[in-house]
Amino acid sequence: MAGTTRAQNAAHAPPSAGEVEWHALSATDAFARVDSVSHGLTQAQAAERLERFGPNALPVKGPPGVAVIFLHQFLSPLIYILLAAGIVSLLIGEVTDAGFIFAVILLNAALGTFQEWKAEKSAAALQSLLKINARVRRDGEESELTADQLVPGDVVLLESGNRVPADLRLFHGKGLAIDESLLTGESLAVEKTIEPLPRHVPLGERRNMAFAGSTATTGRGVGVVVATGLQTQVGRIAKAVTSAAVTKPPLVIRMERFARQISYLVLGFVSLLAVAAVAEGIPPAEVFFMAVALAVSAIPEGLPVAMTVALSIATTRMARRHVIVRKLTAVEGLGSCTCIASDKTGTLTVNRQTVKLLWLPDGRSFAVSGEGYAGEGEVRTVEGSPPEPQDLEQLLRLARAGVLCNEGTLVRRERGWDHHGDAMDVALLALACKLGLQAERVRGELDLIGEIPYESELRYAARCYRGIEGTWVVKGAVERVLAFCDRMQSAGGAVHLDSEAVERQAQQLAENGYRVLAIAEGRSAAGELKSPLEEKDIPALTLLGLAAFIDPLRPEAPAAVATCREAGVQVMMITGDHPATALAIARQLGIAEEAGQMVSGVDLAAEGDPGSADFRQRVAASQVFARVSPLQKLHIVEALGEQGHFTAVTGDGVNDAPALRRANIGVAMGSGTDVAKDTASIIVTDDNFASVVAGVEEGRFAYDNIRKVVYLLISTGGAEIVLFSMALLFGLPLPLLAVQLLWLNLVTNGIQDVALAFEGGEPGVMNRPPRPPGEGVFNRLMIEQNLVSGLTMGLLAFAAWAWMNDRGLPETEARNLTLLLMVLLENVHVFNCRSERSSAFRVPLRRNRVLIFGVAIAQGIHILALGTPLMQKVLGVAPVSLREWFTLLALASILLVVMEIFKRLRFPAGGGPATLHPREKGLTA
Ligand SMILES: Nc1ncnc2c1ncn2[C@@H]1O[C@H](COP(=O)(O)OP(=O)(O)OP(=O)(O)O)[C@@H](O)[C@H]1O
Ligand SMILES: [Cu+]
């Protein structure tokens, strides 16, 4: 809020003296002031200015420093308990105990700090992958730069969906409108002009300026950079912009709450035990320390750190698979999503359009050879002969219109073809090249007066050139273009339009999976035109023909769709394309089979109100949504949510933002607009549907790992409670000293629980349905496995304790052995926890090398302690014989057997294939 008010104040404050009022200058004067020209700076100038003005970036508040993270470790009730215990020990003169407690606190804090600091660092590294790009003109050539490279004087090109990278004085614009809400609080996009304005207009009305941080919502524009970095308007308001607010993901919050609840429960229970112990005549001081230690044992204090580690590992793994996580929530979210609503073009297909067929209105079709964005290939009749001269003339006219109504570029370089712009546009340029037309020559002959640039909700683009009369060229979706036409071109000249024949042809092409564009031209007297063109300025047009494009499927897409099906994740396609094209592609992908699973935007609108039952039913019954508007996309996503779906929705356009925001997980495409990326919680850098599915898999891995850590911590804590309760119940002495319990929990388990978070993914996660969206970590399986393993561990340790007492072993010796048994039990139990379903023997050791290392260290440190005089004194331990060690290990292995039996009974079919995950195969190589 504070930001907004300050922004508004700034908007109304008069410009301070001495500041250049860029909006009041003419474009020419503005260029003079920044010493630049409309075809841009030279590279040398830019380099020199970058040196002088510094990078175009605002200072970002970095991740918290190590000291802050370290201090944070002490803000937990657990630490308070321990500190209290340490202080009490000091007061009653137990200096060694106190020293030990403080050492453990420090060690624990150091471990936690290290893990959290590492997680912060990798998160910061990921954020830096999300830099925004800007299109600039330098040395007269257009190229893409990261926004921080911009300097005053650079010429920047804007199009709908771009974030404005610096403050610009606009000098060229076509229907450009900019959302400046970030700066002015005004949510309506501002239409931009290029004329100079009076000096005293407020910021929000400087309509010939584009300010850094705002976003272009429609149109195109070109401007010259007048301020960068801290000199920009946003830079002056906010001296330090925090990077994407780091809020804790809900899972972490839930876990913290869960840990707190368990803590209270444990405290209550431990108090009861303490009362019982005192009643049995154990000295109160001893009982106090035992109670503290027991509380520490049973509270899953390692959980938050282990979770942070698990989530951070997941984001790193996802990044390797082209999924960049912007909001940590998305990690668990992706794993639990029950449906993915995907775009078609570019996500399921490669968006490498190629014109394959041309159709002329007098009924003839021509095949175009050659693949991809290269002007190499030929146009022939479908029978394979070269076109007749009169056909060729018509084809050339069609191709020429495709070149004129075009924003792309395609140039031959020494090494291959360079292209830029919309895929459809580039494909039309390639087509022209195949027919021997030179795009630059064609464009150079005529003078562009104005255009209606392509926006996906318009579904067409129009341009008007100055010729003898106004020459219009229009291309777009067949139904849109036909609405402007009254005639069609044939060999003998223009004839009356037979729109039925054209539509029939278009439908047939679409059913074969082609994307179809209609191309038309027309004339209007040039004098009447004002610069910003509108739809009503378009005169009656003559249809020149149809172009049919093929956009190959992504080779990985069908398999990814099949994976989703196995994983119980529904896949839906939401596209602006023609229904027949959409259905044909959906069939090839295995998303839908029959026409009944497809619904068009028009049909959907006929179902009535988006909140109505009819509408929702129709959405539920459909897999493919074609020719839908961005608003309908939002309504579809809402309907899915209301049906209890947990949806991941992909998008790339300016207008996808509301749907992405409404989705449980908004997925933006790496090549998408800045607007989409800003609202999404995940960005898929390679635009690939298969990567979204990979993200789902990684999300499930992460969630599984968190469950495993919970399992380990709760069951071992539970075991200690069982051991102590049994001892008290049978009137035996306390089985472990307070310091021993602390050692067990903060050293043995403290090392192991974090190591468990490194567990690699288990194959088979994509063979089971997603967990129900409402289900917490503590489902039935979790409760059962904790009960069984906690009881087994506790009873084994108690049996040993009771037997040793019975045999009259000295208490210290018996404690020493019981402690070692507990350490061994925990070592063994980690292997049980590595998989909730499949046998511990089926989980390859190399899937988690950190864990093997962790277990070895935990056991090694203990052995070391047994032999060190200082630790012997503090912990009350002594070395054991090899025979004793092996006997205890054998005893501990019973736990392994019990849990193997439990898993076998619980999952008779086994926990999935014993085969390695594809990535693990690579690990051995
Ligand atoms: N560059 C263009 N010029 C004119 N018309 C176009 C252009 N690109 C696409 N169209 C028309 O607009 C329709 C919608 O295309 P658009 O690219 O918006 O689909 P989309 O919704 O982005 O696709 P998807 O959702 O599958 O990614 C197309 O079917 C086509 O008829
Ligand atoms: Cu769905």
Image: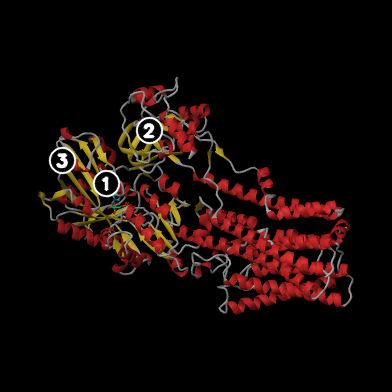
- Tag 1: residue type? Ala
From the image, state whether disc 2 or disc 3 is nearer to you.
Answer: 2
Looking at the picture, tell me which residue is in the foreground, 607 or 520: 607
Q: Which residue is mark 3?
A: 523
- Tag 2: residue type? Gly
Looking at the picture, tell me which residue is in the foreground, 78 or 665: 78
Q: Which residue is mark 1?
A: 432
From the image, state whether disc 1 or disc 2 is nearer to you.
Answer: 2
Q: Which residue is mark 2?
A: 204
From the image, state whether disc 1 or disc 3 is nearer to you.
Answer: 3
Alpha carbon distance from label 1 to label 3: 22 Å
Q: Kindly identify the residue that appears in the image at 72 percent across and 67 percent down.
A: 826
In the image, residue 420 above or below residue 170? below
Looking at the picture, tell me which residue is in the foreground, 815 or 476: 815
Q: Kindly identify the residue that appears in the image at 51 percent across and 52 percent down.
A: 325
Describe the colour scheme in one phrase.
secondary structure
Residue 606 seen in this snapshot: yes
Would residue 771 be found to the left or right of residue 158 on screen? right
